[in-house]
Amino acid sequence: MKKVLSWVLAIIVMCCAAAATAAENATIFKIGEDVLVETGMRVNNVLTINGQITVTGVVEGNVMAMGDSVVLTKTALVKGNVVVLGGVLVKARGAEVRGTITEINSSNISDVITRVLSDEWEGWSWVFAIFSLTIFFSILIIAILVTLLIPKPIQVIAASIREETMKITLWGLLGMVLVVPLAILLTISVVGIVLIPLEMILVVMAGLLGFIAVSQLVGRRLYILFKRPGQHICRETFWGLVVLWLVGWIPYIGWMVKVLALMMGLGAVIYTRFGTHSPRAARYEDASPAS
């Protein structure tokens, strides 16, 4: 359990440190790129997704690699934790890690699961932490791709949530309530049975798209709070997802916040027809005088 808590704390520290100004070069965060902490170089934290981390200098905080490896040379010093998910840790003689080391890959995953589950609830807590991280980074990657490729629908959905919150929430509640009855009705006919997978796909897509839009809205509010408005939609979505993920760890109310975000997102997707229709624009057109 202590390892799980230290791991979660390390991620929270790295996420918070990444919000510092770029001029400080205190934290390194890369996606799809390798990172080299050179000799004589000092950084606070290093976090990569699908990128190798090589340390020959000093890391004051934590080192975490998702989907790649970590190499610690003989002069490396990591004062925090080292977490390697999906890669391997190469530690030279003389390298020093003062925190904990967590390494999970295909070669040791079965041993890790066996050891974790043997610890009863503490083990299950670690499993839930890994599962939560997997879901978070999967949604994060999808969100980055969606905001880069089709930002307009996300902006339309987020705007509808911001402007008509109550109506959107009711639409979301209605959509969540009707999912199961609709699936049951489809089983009545042969054609309907064939359409059930299509319904599930549409529901998942709508929920995911709506959750991304809610994250973008949360990230936008966060930047406004820190008096840095006008950020790129990808950056807003990233920090919104981080905030929602961290809030999800709050006991008792965390899951309720996530369900509410999912419900509002689903309602906004339904209300805006997957972000292709802006109710505000439609009202403006109806109010304009005929030519």
Image (cartoon, rainbow, N blue to C red):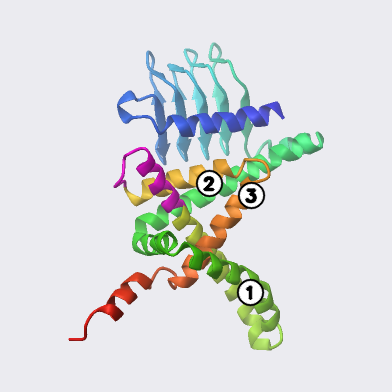
Q: Which quadrant does the N terminus fall into?
A: top right
Please indicate, yes or no, whether residue 52 appears anywhere in the rendered image: no
User: Quick check: 184 left or right of 173?
Assistant: right
Q: Is 51 situated above or below 76?
A: below
User: Quick check: 187 left or right of 241?
Assistant: right
- Residue 97, position as x, y percentages in the image: 56, 17
**Residue 127 falls in which quadrant of the image?**
top right
Q: The residue under label 2 is which amino acid type?
A: Leu
Which residue in the structure is indicated by mark 2? 244
User: Quick check: 149 left or right of 127?
Assistant: left
Q: Residue at x 41, y 43 (%)?
A: 222
Label 2 environment density (alpha carbons within 10 Å; few <14, some 14–19, many ≥20): many
Helix, strand or loop for disc 3: helix
Going from N to C along the chain, the mark reached first, 1 or 3, is: 1
Which residue in the structure is indicated by mark 1? 178
In the orientation shown, which residue stands out farthest toward the left? 291
Q: The residue under label 1 is which amino acid type?
A: Leu
Q: Nearer the viewer, residue 175 or 84?
A: 175
Q: Is 141 situated above or below 285?
A: above
Please indicate, yes or no, whether residue 120 appears anywhere in the rendered image: yes
Verify CB contact (< 8 Å) between mark 1 and mark 3.
no
- Residue 159, position as x, y percentages in the image: 38, 61
Label 1 environment density (alpha carbons within 10 Å; few <14, some 14–19, many ≥20): few
Helix, strand or loop for disc 2: helix
Q: Residue at x 74, y 36 (%)?
A: 111
Which residue in the structure is indicated by mark 3? 255
Q: Residue at x 66, y 37 (%)?
A: 107
Measured Cα–Cα span from mark 3 to mark 2: 10 Å
